[in-house]
Image (cartoon, rainbow, N blue to C red):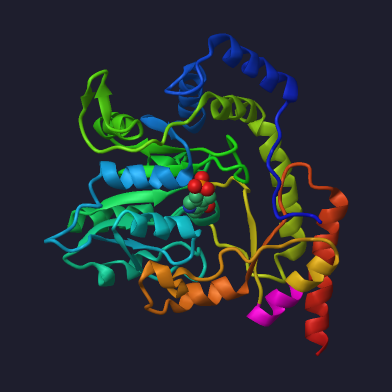
Amino acid sequence: MIPVTKPFMPNREKLDQYLDGIYERKWLTNNGPLAQELTSRLEEYLGVENLLLVSNGTLALQIAYRVLGINEPVNGKPAEAITTPFTFIATASSLKWDGIQPVFADIDPETWCLASKNIEAQITQQTRAIVPVHVFGNACDVETIDSIAQKYNLKVIYDACHAFGVKYQGESLLKHGDAATLSFHATKLFHTGEGGAIIFKRKEDLERAKKLINFGISGPESIEELGINAKMNEFQAAMGLCVLDEMEANMAARYAVWDSYERELAGSVQLQKKSEDLYYNASYFPAVFECESVALQVAGLLKQNGILARRYFFPSLETVECLGRKDYQPVSHDIAGRILCLPIYAGIEEKAQKSVIDVIKLCLAKGRQR
Ligand SMILES: *Cc1c(COP(=O)(O)O)cnc(C)c1O
């Protein structure tokens, strides 16, 4: 089976060298030398400051909520955060898990990001934050979101898990918001097996987060506040350093796949409309079909040919019972029903790419004959 993605496996000898160092030092976690090195190398690579490594992308979100205080109830009632229904479950479930009610606002039908025009209608006395997602690495409408946040005194936390290396107007997209969070899960463009990071706008937020990820401990004999364990260990950092060294090759390989899909399919499927002045990372290739039954037919025929396309993101999150919000989101619901993400990863065989394209074209041509 050709999967939708495969983890990038970096040079093994180099990884072994890092492992030798770990064995010599016997320093396995708690901000070890490799975690420190990865922190500064990522800050430089991404062009950001105040980056904190954490153990995964979900805890990155939760630490950001805590540091920015958006989990505090308002007048004794749970706080609310306005977010998108068209994302991975962790964006909304992390809010709910921390006692914050996710309140959905619908997406834009072309960019598939939270539509800024839908945000204000959802603001209540309880609202403390906006949690938009740079979905598939596309930039949200950061200027408008920023001005709404200022007007209503809300915090903005971008779930930027898809936006590693993305630049907007010549600068890192991760600079926007009070915080932006990354996931370094094995399936992401850049990975540490499991892992993640938070980029804070303010240095004081970074300093506080350093304590929160280490049980709230502020010194050998003092516990300053409630914390949790969200530290990245040295094995994760070693993997990250190796993957980072090969980013250029990884990206070039993905671009080649992305470009060939686009060349062949742009006329037959709906592709995501990117924001202007975006340097994109080619981490996903989402395609929207004319209706759900065509998307399902395509997925079925691909599967018969040994190829797994994923319905990603599906379902639209307002339909997920445990999130506690049922207001129908027509655009997200519609896109989620018709979307497939096609296989894209460094090292995917040319034959597999070609057969993805052929199967989709065949399926669409059959549809047209009927
Ligand atoms: C991967 C992902 C997460 C969760 O990250 P983990 O590292 O798997 O915890 C959250 N949000 C989005 C949009 C993601 O793609």
Q: Where is residue 260 in the image (x, y as percent from the top left)?
A: 76, 54
Residue found at the far right of this picture: 351
- Left or right of 32, for residue 127: left
Q: In this view, does 208 lie above or below 67?
A: above
> Residue most toward the left?
75
At 22% across and 62% down in the image, what residue appears? Answer: 78
Q: Residue 11 placed where, x, y %? A: 73, 26
Viewer-proximal residue, 3 or 179? 3
Most foreground residue, 169 or 299: 299
Q: Secondary structure of the magenta portion, mostly?
A: helix
Residue drawn 58% across and 75% down?
Answer: 337
Q: Which residue lies furthest to the bottom in this view?
A: 370
Q: Where is residue 257 in the image (x, y as percent from the top left)?
A: 74, 50
The answer to whether residue 275 of the structure is visible from this angle is no
Q: Which quadrant of the rendered structure holds the C terminus? A: bottom right
Quarter of the picture containing the N terminus is bottom right
Please report the residue visible at 49 percent of the width from the left and 61 percent of the height from the top.
87
The image shows residue 198, relative to residue 21, as above or below, that is below
Magenta segment includes 74: no
The magenta span reads 290-298
